[in-house]
Image: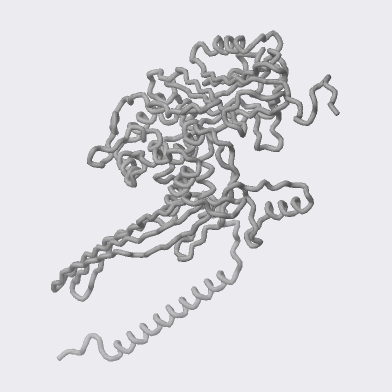
Amino acid sequence: MGAEPYGPGYRMNKKKNTFRRLLHAGFAGIAVVTVLAGCVSAPLDARRETDYHAKGPTADRPVVRPTRALTSFTDSLMCMDRLLRASNLPTTLIASKQIPDPTGKVPAATKDMIVTALSQMSRLSNAFRYVDYEVDIARQDTVQNLTTILLNNNQLQLQRPALYVSGAVAYFDQQVISNRWDVGTSAARLDTGYSQSRNASVLALELHLGDFRTRTLIPGIDSANEVVIGGGGQGMDIAGRIGSYSVNFNVGRDYSLGVGGALRTLIDLGVIEMVGKWARVPYWQCLTLENTDPHFQRQMRDWFDEGSPLAQNRLVQQSLISQGYLAPNGIEMGAGDPELVEALGRFQADSGITVSGVVDFPTYERALRDFVKLSPDGRLLQVGWSPSAAALPTVPMSPLVSATGGARTSVGGPGGARVLDLQMKNPMVGRSAFEVGEQVFVSASLSRASYLYCFMQDGAGRVLRLLPNPTNPNALVSGSLALRIPDWMSPLPGFIMDATNPGTERLTCFATGRDLGTLLPALLAAPAFRPIPDVPDLAAVTAAIANATARDGYTAASLEWQVVPRRPPANVPPAGNAPRS
């Protein structure tokens, strides 16, 4: 036999070569580690990362637009605001206790939610002013500390509220009902599984209204409601084996209705019930609207997702035209059209939603909710529109019921009616006569954002401009918001209205869709609160405004009252009569 081509010597040399390669690789690895360790020990130069760090502020910003916190009773709060204004209630000061949660399972700012609900209920009516005073030292802040200092030095007077809200989270029963089921299969090389679960919890809230003067809860003025908070999930598992290897796949989806949103819904409902019972207004009319249906917003969301951006823009644009925010010029505007953006901004501001100037879901839902109703079987139906509709019927304006001592006028303008409502807001409801020297308080509100101009004719026949004025130089007024004339809740109202000369005094306000500052220099350039020269009466003001707005019209509303001489005190004898002995 021949010699082996690779003998024992070769095998020995091969092992030595392998050892040397490993040794060299080890030394190389140690060298690399040493170099890396030296790099790590040396300080990094932050200037080299400038481009990377520059992206931090952008990455820190949210990727979705903020939205207004809405519940099923948001429109009901607006409805209550109109009812309270129609009843002509004077402004009431109100406070609230801390609303405790004995369960410890509902961490939410309940008291602040109550303040927000009362505020939304007072935009038009000025029904409530919240007294913000905190006694608990642990909750006091800078404003509270300054308030305490001023109170102790008699430099500030704290007004006593008439009412206060009391209550608590009654209970939170978790998973009062729950079920779960699983199914699976198993084979030599494949295993599958599927599971599904669902549960329901119950949250309850109790609210009461109390008389602050006596610290007693008013019988019958309360609210006790519950809401169900649901949750559920689905899951699927797949496992397979290929030889000695295995592959696992798991997917699932879950949902859980929020506790905070459920609590806000209960608070909105509870405040509506308490205020309605206290003010003795038909509050139930505000709770029977279709949009209080719990599925309303979810159904509107489905319709929003089904439509294309072009269809959504067209629908909202037609709604803005029907409500008077856009002129019906027959031209379909694009998403970035400046006129459409401005109209969207006004509509969003008047509707109490976040102003963005774009057709997002809250704007879509608010603009088209008047075209939704309940069918006989309880389902939500579209009325007069569809995701691809090209036109909408005219939206009827929400009626504002006239109260005693109020004036309400609605005239036609481009795209619909504008409603202007004036009301006397003196404490005694229905007054039509004032003594010389008495103050007169008026409240004005508009159905949509407009330019507002107010003029007064006193008992001597002189005409003065009240709005705009140096304190309120901007004539643009938001819709669905009460404007106090003068602002009796402000320590510096800018002016006061005193009954002056015996006779008849009149107040007329005009609302327009555009600024009249350059069109009426004689009326609007003259100083406010002073007689306007060459203007004999309010009829001349009306004629001038009608001439300046001949193209798009205006809205006017008036109030008048009698001024009588001041009566002498009862203990002072009439002049010329000597007292008898």
**In which image quadrant can residue 285 be found?**
top left
The vertical placement of 212 against 18, above or below, is above
Which percent across, then down, holds residue 372? 32, 35
According to the image, what is the colour scheme of the structure?
A: one colour
The vertical placement of 481 against 3, above or below, is above
Please state which of residues 105 and 425 is positioned toward the viewer in this rendering.
425
Which percent across, then down, holds residue 47? 60, 56
Please state which of residues 576 and 27 is positioned toward the viewer in this rendering.
576
Say how many tags the image has.
0
Q: Residue furthest front?
A: 581
The residue depicted at 72 percent of the width and 15 percent of the height is 531
The residue depicted at 63 percent of the width and 29 percent of the height is 441
The residue depicted at 33 percent of the width and 24 percent of the height is 393
Q: In the rendered image, which quarter contains the N terminus?
A: bottom left
**In which image quadrant can residue 442 be found?**
top right
Residue 539 seen by the camera = yes
Which percent across, then down, holds residue 416? 42, 21
Please state which of residues 581 and 265 is positioned toward the viewer in this rendering.
581
Residue 109 seen by the camera = no
The residue depicted at 33 percent of the width and 58 percent of the height is 230
287 with respect to 451 (left or right): left
